[in-house]
Every structure is written in structure tokens, then in C-alpha cells.
Amino acid sequence: RYSLPNIILEHKYELNIQSVRKLVVNCNSTKLGTVDSNNILRIYNTFIKDHKATSKGWVSAAKNPCLFERKDVWDMKWDEQKPEMFVAMEKLRVLLFQDCMEDPDDPILSNGYLMRCNNLEV
């Protein structure tokens, strides 16, 4: 993470992810969603208060910043207004998550693509 306008390194995130296909940040930049080539969705917390200074900048002291993991996901979108809400495409189902820590709402069958998510409207 860099500060603007000086472009100074504030924080460095180190994630062990192989071949990321999609990287998406939520509307207030507190969470990062990734989908890798094995169709695994992972949600990471990017707002970590517990960090330490090193010679290379700020490095997270958290051992496992991954908040959420789900298999068989090939696409995801964050809500444009609510930073905790996101939509994921799992096989032929649309899953709406209100929060990373909760189970999704009832899945909806769909063979389409996600374009955007705005206040429960996909």
C-alpha cells in the first residue's frame, strides 16, 4: 500500500498464492479478493493494525491474513457501496455473501456472468 501524493510505501502484503486469475479490492480498500487458477476464492484483510517496520517498508505481522476461502469459484464482485458484501459465481450458482464470516444467502441458478453488484442488485 502506498500513500498519495508522495507515493511512499506504507505497507507490504505477502501472500502465498500461485497463479492468480483475478484480484479485486472492495469499495473502501479494507479487503482483497483473489481467485486463483484452481478456482479457489480467498478474501484477505488489508486493514491490519498489527504491523512492524522493516528496512523494506511495513510488513504485516499477522500469520494468516486470509479471512475466507471457498472452492469452485470462478468469478467474484464486491458490492459498490457496502464493503462487506460480495457476490461469487460457484459452478452454475450465484452466491450472495453479506459478510465473510457468514454463510451465503440462498443460491440462485445462473449460467451468466457477473457485471456488477450494487446494494443487493446483481
Image (spheres, grey):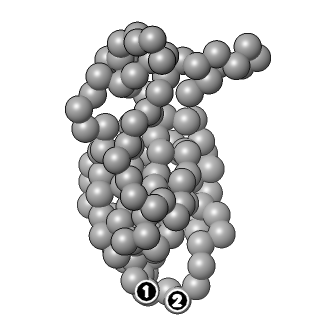
Tell me where residue 19 appears, x and y as whole percent.
45, 61
Give me the residue at 25% from left, 38% from top. 64
Task: Examine the rendering and report whether any part of residue 18 can be seen.
Answer: yes
Element at label 1 = loop
Answer few, some or many: residues within 10 Å of disc 2's Cα (few below 14, many 20 plus, some between 14 and 19): few
Examine the rendered structure and indicate whether residue 18 appears above or below residue 115.
above
Give me the residue at 40% from left, 12% from top. 54
Residue most extreme to the front = 55
Mark 2 to mark 1: distance in Å?
5 Å
Kind of residue indicated by mark 1: Leu
Q: Mark 2 touching mark 1, by CB under 8 A?
A: yes
Q: Which mark is residue 53?
A: none
Residue labelled with disc 1: 92
Kind of residue indicated by mark 2: Asn
Give me the residue at 34% from left, 75% from top. 72
Residue most extreme to the right = 5
65 with respect to 95 (left or right): left
Q: Residue 54 versus residue 117: which sits nearer the camera? A: 54
Residue labelled with disc 2: 111
The quadrant of the picture occupied by the N terminus is: top right
Task: Examine the rendering and report whether any part of residue 97 can be seen.
Answer: no
> Image quarter for residue 37?
bottom left
> Image quarter for residue 78?
bottom right
Q: Of the residues under marks 2 and 1, which one precedes in the sequence?
A: 1
> Image quarter for residue 53?
top left
